[in-house]
Amino acid sequence: MGLFTKDIQSMDDLFAHQLQDMYYAENKIVGSLPDMIEKSTNPDLKTAFESHLQETKSQVRRLEQVFQLCGLETKAVDCPALDGIIEEAEEVAGDVAEDRVLDAALIAAGQSVEHYEIARYGTLIAWAKTLGRNDCANLLAQNLAEEKAADQKLTSIAESGANRAAA
């Protein structure tokens, strides 16, 4: 089922597809965060990534609950958008030799991921409410709140010294 194919016949199908997209994305992030943790030299950044890894694992479990509530098979569909964000982050990180500059690059990469997730969760929440699935919307809202908090934490780290250190 592709987003712009005739496989999606209804709003329920669209919701399911985007849910599968986020399931893929969150699992991909669980796989990528350990590398970001390892590359981080700023202690606050390392801690923020470690904390968000645990949150992301909880987000995966909440998505699994949403699948279950909707009577859907828990499965993922490829998310080329997130793959591109992560690929770009890996390329940039591989090109940075100076640790403090790398920390700034990792913050930017993390925020790119967070902004993608914030947009997707906002959409999923709106669709869940439209479909009368407030139970699902409430679970997704928990994920959205964590993504917004993670984004704010990265902004705080950047503004409190990581960006100046990189400059």
Image: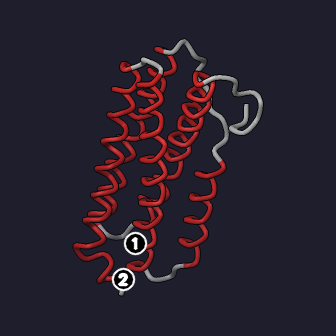
Q: Is residue 137 above or below residue 102?
A: above
Q: Is residue 8 left or right of residue 130?
A: right
Residue 150 percent across, percent down from the top left: 32, 52
Q: Residue at x 66, y 35 (%)?
A: 77
The tag earlier along the polypeptide, 1 or 2, is 1
Q: Is residue 2 above or below residue 74?
A: below
Count of numbered circles on the image: 2
Q: Residues within 10 Å of mark 1 (few under 14, many from 20)?
A: many
- The three-letter code of the residue at mark 1 reads Asp
Q: Which residue is mark 2?
A: 166
Q: Is residue 129 left or right of residue 11?
A: left
Residue 41 percent across, percent down from the top left: 36, 70
Q: Residue at x 46, y 14 (%)?
A: 69
Q: Residue farthest to the left?
A: 160
Q: Residue at x 54, y 31 (%)?
A: 19
Q: Residues within 10 Å of mark 2 (few under 14, many from 20)?
A: some
Which element type, helix, strand or loop, lies under badge 2? helix
Residue 103 bears which disc, if any? 1
Q: CA distance from mark 1 to mark 2?
A: 8 Å
- Where the C terminus falls, by quadrant? bottom left
Quadrant of residue 125 in the image?
top left
Quadrant of residue 132 in the image?
top left
Q: Residue farthest to the right?
A: 6
Q: Residue at x 66, y 49 (%)?
A: 80
Pointers 1 and 2 in contact (C-beta within 8 Å): yes
Which element type, helix, strand or loop, lies under badge 1? helix
- The three-letter code of the residue at mark 2 reads Ala
Residue 113 percent across, percent down from the top left: 48, 55
- According to the image, what is the colour scheme of the structure? secondary structure
Residue 124 percent across, percent down from the top left: 47, 34
- Where the N terminus falls, by quadrant? top right
Q: Is residue 164 above or below residue 52?
A: below
